Image (cartoon, coloured by chain):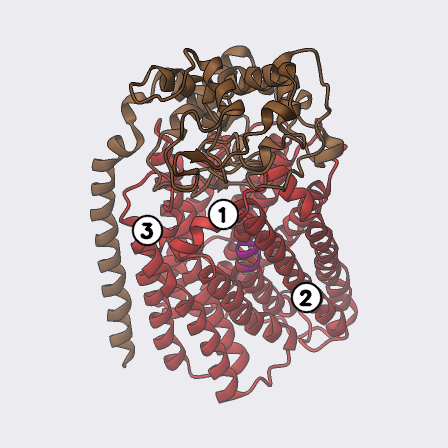
Chain colours: A red, B brown
Amino acid sequence: MRYRSQAVAYPYFAVALLLFGLQIAFGLLAAVKYLGPDPLINLLPFDRVKAIHTNLLIVWVLTGFMGAAYHVVPEESGTELWSPRLAYIALGLWVLMGLTAVIGYVFGWTEGNKLLEQPYPLKLLIVVVMLMFLANLLLTIRRAGRWTTTEAVLVAGLILTALLYLPALLTFDNYTVSIFYRWWTVHLWVEGVWEMVQGALLAYLLIRLSGVDREVLEKWLYVIVGLTFISGILGMAHHYYFVGVPHYWLPIGGFFSALEPLVFLGMAMYAYFAMRRSGLSHPNTLAVHWAIGSAIFSALGAGLLGLAHTWPAVNKWTHGTLITAMHGHAAFFGAYVMIVLAMITYAVPGLTSREETTLERPLGLWAFWLMVGGMFGMTLAFATAGIGQVYLERITGLGFLETQRKIQVHFLMLTGTGLLFALGVALYLWDFFVVSPRLARTGAPRSATAAP
Amino acid sequence: MTKRGTRLFFLGGTLAATLVLLVLTVDSHRQFPRLTHAERITPAVVAGKHVWHRKNCVNCHTLMGEGAYYAPDLTKITEQRGVPYLQAFLKDPSKFYSEARDRRLMPNLQLSSQEIDEVIAFLGWVAKIDNQGWPPRPLLVSGAAVPGSNVGGSVPHAVSTDPAEQGEALFRTTPPGCFACHSVAPGVNLAGPSLAGLGRRAGETVRNAGYQGKATDAAGYIRESILHPSAHLVAGPSYSADGRSFMPDNFSTLLTDEQVDHLVAYLATLP
């Protein structure tokens, strides 16, 4: 940590991780409901649990992005943050919004629009917090009068994230038109501007962890975000299959979304060459694990598993089945969960003023492998359940309910591997909230540097 | 490539893709009214859409394949279930499905009769949207469209004294094993044609000039089809050849008169 105001990132990371833990608790509850019967059916039915699970994911990943930006921008621009106070106020409002949303969902206060369930007043609050956040970053950069490519891509991705939330404020009487614009937020976030954020954070981490030449890495960063938008903007058409839009969206979706894996292939190669060229001698091996892991796991989850069902002729059969859940879980984990955890793991030693090689490394590695292994198992569970569902329900014409009964064993596997994943999350939280602060107190603190 | 070159690649590619998206968006708006039959979006449909959202339906069900995967897809539900059925179901789903057997059940959403009618109107509008012919074959909530795979749980032989309900139980019993060749889901043609909407179609058939049999009304036609399958043939190379139906013609000996009455009563009510 070179600038004191980078410390703002720490409470953001803490909030992100707490919400992560809560998200996983609700995820496990949802998995158990798949096994059924459900004793909570009238108290907390599946729909509410699922909405909380997905919304917490979005909120905590965004919290992580904000924390990461507060860590990256001062360092890249070479100045203190414009206003740490504004950042703390924004975090307070953000937490208020998140908790109100979760409690609201429990009691059925929802707009019931998939992934954009936030009630309207909370949507407005989200916009306000995003504006405070962006203002803080932009004023910091303006005061410094300089910025790097990595930082520019990161901030541009965050500005576009805020802009693309605006379609979520629109409502339409025509359900098909609602779906059409819902994806402008959801798809262009996760398969567009969030990939900019992921690419930029990956570049930031690789530059520091591997010491590879910044010019080379930033050159390829442009190629990666270029490919992201060339494939991703029109690749949105793969969400327009079978929802009442003009038929030409089918071939467009097939063609452009088949290009989307190139982005993740690019990121994986990026990480590989950085590693080959400079070696990974950085003492924070955990951060290296998470950064390289993100590049590899997103190539699998977002790239390959997306490609697996993106052709219209395949999607005709898999549309609306657990195959989608398979892709969704692996993609979100690889691309966004892992990159945020990589940033946190990289930043924490600096934020807590301690050496980067410390005794808790085995604990951190356990957390890493349990999460990676657990998610791999969950992906397989969803995949096998989905393949069973497509065959039984879609191909042979067995009823939905009978099909779900026949694939029960995969829900058992989902719950079991989900528990492994949850254990990994618990260890990560234990490391962050209990072990690290203790080390900071007892360990030899590095000389905390003030602003130059 | 230089850094400047890759930056141009990024900016140019993004701009081009955005422009194409905007042009296609304008064109899509031109086509939405026709593809979605926008003229049928009545106030009841709009109110039903609000019920759909307010009750968070999309976080269990899918509609046009979008939503959550915990409960059945509802895109074509109004083509598979009549309005009275859906009204009764939404009043109390636990009367229709067993959580003990299916491992999951729809909670009672405590909807008012008006809300129920509105959400049914909304689903009825959705079912008519031109969505590229999806699903490619009907998605059943329960039951089976495959011969011999009646795994939907056993149907009691005498559920009540109602002839139609007795007929349904008989339909799913072997013999006569009607279900093995006939689906009651619309558009699912197995060895025999789908029996969905048979009561309505039977009336039309007997009034049609091309009708070859002796029946004079819908019930008579259904009875004739069971006992004398070749009296009038449904077109299709997999259903008959040389003027003879592929359907067995021994049901007059296999079934009692009363059983045939029950089957007719049941088949005439199929939605």
The residue indicated by pointer 2 is A373
Disc 2 to disc 1, C-alpha distance: 39 Å
Residue that appears at 62% across and 20% down? B167
SS label for mark 2: helix
Three-letter code for the amino acid on which mark 2 is drawn: Gly
Majority SS type along the magenta span: helix
The residue indicated by pointer 3 is A250
Mark 3, Cα crowd under 10 Å, few <14 / some 14-19 / many 20+, is many
Chain letter, disc 3 residue = A
Q: Say if labels 2 and 1 share a chain.
A: yes
Q: Earlier in the sequence, mark 3 or mark 2?
A: 3
Residue B228 rendering spot, x and y as whole percentages: 50, 24
User: In this orientation, does residue B42 appear?
Assistant: yes
Residue A428 rendering spot, x and y as whole percentages: 71, 61
Image-based side of A10 in relation to A438, left or right: left
The number of discs equals 3
Labels 3, 2: front one: 3
The quadrant of the rendering that contains the N terminus of chain A is: bottom right
Q: Earlier in the sequence, mark 2 or mark 1?
A: 1
Per the rendered image, the range of residues in magenta is: A326-330
Chain letter, disc 1 residue = A
SS label for mark 1: helix
Residue B18 location, quadrant? bottom left
User: B217 above or below A253?
Assistant: above
Disc 1 to disc 3, C-alpha distance: 46 Å
